[in-house]
Amino acid sequence: MPLDDGETITALNRDAKMTSTGIFTYTGLPTRSQTAEKTRISRKGPHHRPLTELAHEKLALAWTPEAGYVIEDILELSENSALSDIEHRNAFYLRQLRLQISTILAKSPAQLSIEETSLLLISYHYLVAMRLSKQSAFCTDAVVKQYPVVRDACLTFLKDRRGLWPKMLTNRIVTQSFGINWNDTPRKRRNSDKMRSLAEKADLFRRYEEMNDLFPKRSGAPHNALATASRFEERHRYSDLWNRLVRADPNYKEMLKTGTRDAFFDDDFCDFFKWAATNLEL
């Protein structure tokens, strides 16, 4: 489903008022695995299926279990760059999408059935997978055109939903949208007024902080926030974001100390590197 295992547990804690012990007892998860399960970002854990069943029982989720499995399949295939398999393995649902998406988009959120919201969320995850591709065979003109329409429909639908899971999905959709624009923009133009305006409109740094506050051991949000702040040369953010990043993944401290660079700790961090040389003790 759209939520990974760690998010599901957190939503059950907050929205269903379930204790972690109660969740783990229900799913048969041994005590020694509790810490790992809370931080799990995948959907492949041995207790994923009972967690999913529990979430559908206790939370007012906006998708069917079947749609959740389709979304999981799309996410997994996208992560493995197997985009052609998305069409082959989910042909039925994608066919239904193409037949019904115009009708779904024409309705208000209150008019949508759970089957329709399921198709809307499948459509969003499918379009994101295609939109992130560098291959024109997948990231077609039609995908580029339809993605923001479906994205905005999802955000409108989530806006009035109560609970933690709509907030988590909203933050993910908004930050993914900014990330797509970021990836489309040449590095030297990422410090542009346009990108700054997009970040401000998205309330980007607040969203990254919320994501990190919920899951402090996940490095994605503070990493992306620090890269963006560095491109914008917003040095007043560096100390807090660096502390968040190192708390999530201490390896970054060693990488900075040794001058190691990789595909993720890259030129977007140039201004941060300059600041760190005189402001951090490693």
Image (tube, grey):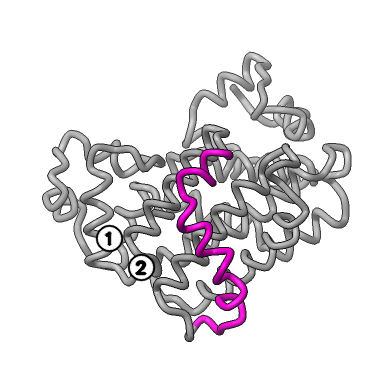
Image height of 126 relative to 186, above or below:
below
Q: Residues within 10 Å of mark 2 (few under 14, many from 20)?
A: some
The residue indicated by pointer 1 is 55
Please indicate whether residue 145 sits to the left or right of residue 94 in the image. Answer: right
Residue 243 seen in the current view = no
Can you give x and y, in whole percent of width and height, for residue 196 in the image? 80, 56
Quadrant location, the C terminus = top right
Q: Residue 112, can we see it?
A: yes
Say which amino acid is labelled 2. Leu
Pick the front one: 257 or 29:
29
Find residue 112 and report its horizontal and vertical position in percent. 47, 80
User: 171 or 222, which lies in front?
Assistant: 171
Circle 1: element type: helix
Q: Which mark is residue 61?
A: 2
Q: Is residue 184 magenta?
A: no
Instruction: Look at 52% across and 75% down and name the residue there.
Output: 157
Dominant SS type (magenta): helix
Whether 80 is drawn above or below 160: the answer is above
| Residue extent of the magenta highlight | 84-109
Q: Is residue 69 above or below residue 116?
A: above
Res 185 → quadrant: top right
Quadrant position of the N terminus in the picture: bottom left
The stretch drawn in magenta includes residue 108: yes
Residues tagged 2 and 1 counted as in contact (Cβ below 8 A): yes
Of labels 2 and 1, earlier in sequence is 1
Residue drawn at (24%, 67%), measured in percent from left and top?
A: 58
The structure residue drawn at horizontal position 53% and vertical position 36%, both measured from the top left corner, is 79
